[in-house]
Image (cartoon, grey):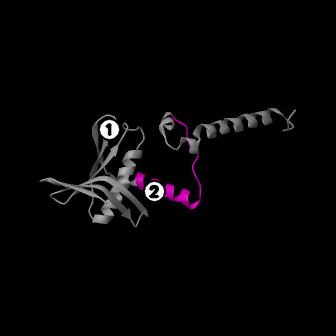
């Protein structure tokens, strides 16, 4: 159930459920602010620091696409607050970000339809992930190294068999 906070110039809705029937998305916005002009501004909270990739901005844009469909209003900007740096960054929902978000949604939808799970990629952030024991990203990476080794061995053996 969403929580509300009202101030003279802005109303904040916390944990607001979102959906887009057009895109087939459902989700939850951390905060949606509505100013006295009736404009909506989404705000996403993140525990870490800003990432080099656009994953956080794409997530916020997907929430915005849902919110736009629900309210029938265009939303130009939103914010991401990073607790790791205690900074808020502005996110402008330009056409490039919207296109990237729609492409990501389509790519994920294709994975679901094909019943495919992308292979995990091991990185330092895996150590703090609660799913690392199920995902086993370092094991998959080692498997690829073994496959590469076996391929090299059979290439060096003209008969393709073992000695």
Question: In the displayed image of the protein, which residue is found farthest to the left?
Answer: 8
Q: Is residue 113 magenta?
A: yes
- Number of residues whose C-alpha sits closer than 10 Å to that of mark 2, classed few (under 14), some (14–19) or many (20 or more): some
Instruction: List the residue tagged with mark 1.
Output: 83
Residue 82 image offset from top left, x and y in percent? 32, 39
Q: What residue appears at the point 55 percent right and 40 percent down from the top-left corner? A: 121
Please tell me whether mark 2 sits on a helix, a strand or a loop.
helix
Query: Which residue is painted at 56% across and 61% down in the image?
Result: 113
Which residue is the site of mark 2? 105
Q: Nearer the viewer, residue 31 or 37?
A: 31
Q: Where's the C terminus, which quadrant?
A: top right
Q: Is residue 80 magenta?
A: no
Q: Is residue 82 left or right of residue 111?
A: left
Please report the residue visible at 55 percent of the width from the left and 37 percent of the height from the top: 122
Residues rendered magenta in the picture: 100-123
Above/below status of 82 relative to 33 = above
Q: Position of residue 13 (x, y in %)?
A: 25, 56
């Amino acid at each position: 159930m969403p929580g509300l906070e009202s101030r003279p110039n802005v109303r904040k809705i916390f944990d607001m459920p979102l959906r887009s029937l057009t895109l087939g998305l459902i989700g939850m916005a951390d905060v949606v602010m509505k100013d006295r002009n009736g404009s909506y501004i989404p705000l996403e909270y993140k525990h870490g620091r800003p990432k080099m990739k656009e994953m956080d901005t794409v997530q916020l844009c997907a929430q915005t696409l849902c919110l736009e469909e629900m309210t029938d209003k265009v939303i130009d900007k939103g914010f991401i607050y990073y607790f790791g740096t205690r900074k808020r960054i502005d996110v402008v929902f330009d056409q490039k970000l919207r296109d990237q978000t729609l492409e990501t949604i389509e790519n994920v939808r294709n994975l679901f339809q094909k019943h495919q799970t992308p292979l995990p990629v091991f990185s330092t952030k895996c150590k703090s992930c609660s799913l690392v024991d199920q995902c086993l990203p370092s094991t998959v990476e080692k498997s690829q190294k073994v496959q590469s080794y076996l391929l090299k061995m059979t290439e060096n053996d003209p008969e393709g068999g073992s000695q």
